[in-house]
Image (cartoon, rainbow, N blue to C red):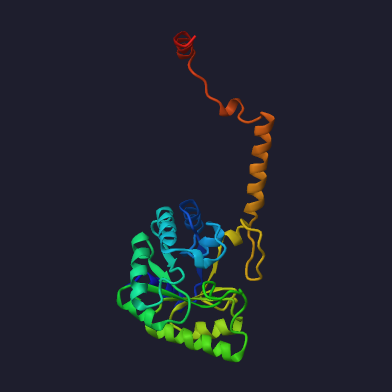
Amino acid sequence: MSKADLFLDKKRRGEKIVVVTAYDAPTARIEVEAGVDIILVGDSVGVNVLGYAHEREVTLADMAHHIAAVRRGAPDVYLIGDLPFATYDTPEQALTSSRLLRDAGADCVKFEGAQPDVVAALTAAGFDVCGHLGLESQHQEVKRRQGKTAAAAAKLLDDALAGDAAGQKFLVLELVPRELAARISRSVRAATIGIGAGPDVDGQVLVVNDLAGVTTRDFKHNRRYADIGAALRAAVGAYAAEVRAGAFPGPAQSFHMAEDERAAFERMRP
């Protein structure tokens, strides 16, 4: 029985699944202490941590590096890792790429778009697979809502069913109408994880930088639960002011030699 089956049981019981991104060990450790169910090491690491302009710039080496860091911080949590752009164009390529992420610590691999042949190949090789439909950041230049027309919604439902038949365990639905996300969730065995897809899915995922206010971007699908960015700016600003004023470090942050050692040192180097 795969670890993923525990989350499929949650779906059957109607229990919501809590997913959040992490890109480093300290954040992963905090998230586990806060009680998350799943950590996603997403290709969002590129724009949120690495300073890239687009998710397409993220490499397999980047993903493996950050997955390994998160695994060290959260050794027991279920961990989903993103396959980056152009690393899963064929089943053979997807298998090679997925082995690298699994070796780094991923329990499950995620990729964007409707490729049931890739899902089937990975599943047959023993991988847990997470699909991703709706907004596909790697493939769509403009980040806008998907599935707004009847035809587009029908295509997304058909794609979801095809991935489900191929054996995917999870399905991320990003920026799709609530009604469509609800229909897909009822129609597939996989646990659906929404981001901007409304509440009628099996779980939710947000980017940790967005929910904690590390970044200042505002998204309709996000709720900012803290303002870590403002707190960090204030802390660094206060530190800088004290350094310039000579107030830091003070006596509490300074160390002294023992008097006898200091006297000996002065005699050695008068």
In the rendered image, residue 30, in percent from the top left (x then y), is placed at: 50, 53
User: Which quadrant would the N terminus be assigned to in this image?
Assistant: bottom left
Which residue is at the front of the view, 129 or 29? 129
Which residue is at the front of the view, 64 or 157? 64
Q: Residue at image x 48%, y 51%?
A: 26
In the rendered image, residue 146, in percent from the top left (x then y), is placed at: 59, 81
State whether residue 167 appears in this view: no
In the rendered image, residue 206, in percent from the top left (x then y), is placed at: 56, 66
In the rendered image, the vertical position of residue 222 relative to residue 49, given as above or below: below
The image quadrant that residue 78 belongs to is bottom left
Q: Residue at image x 46%, y 13%?
A: 265
Q: Residue at image x 50%, y 64%?
A: 57
State whether residue 172 appears in this view: yes
Q: Is residue 222 left or right of residue 257?
A: right
In the rendered image, residue 110, in percent from the top left (x then y), is placed at: 44, 71
Which residue is at the front of the view, 188 or 176? 176
Q: How many marks?
A: 0
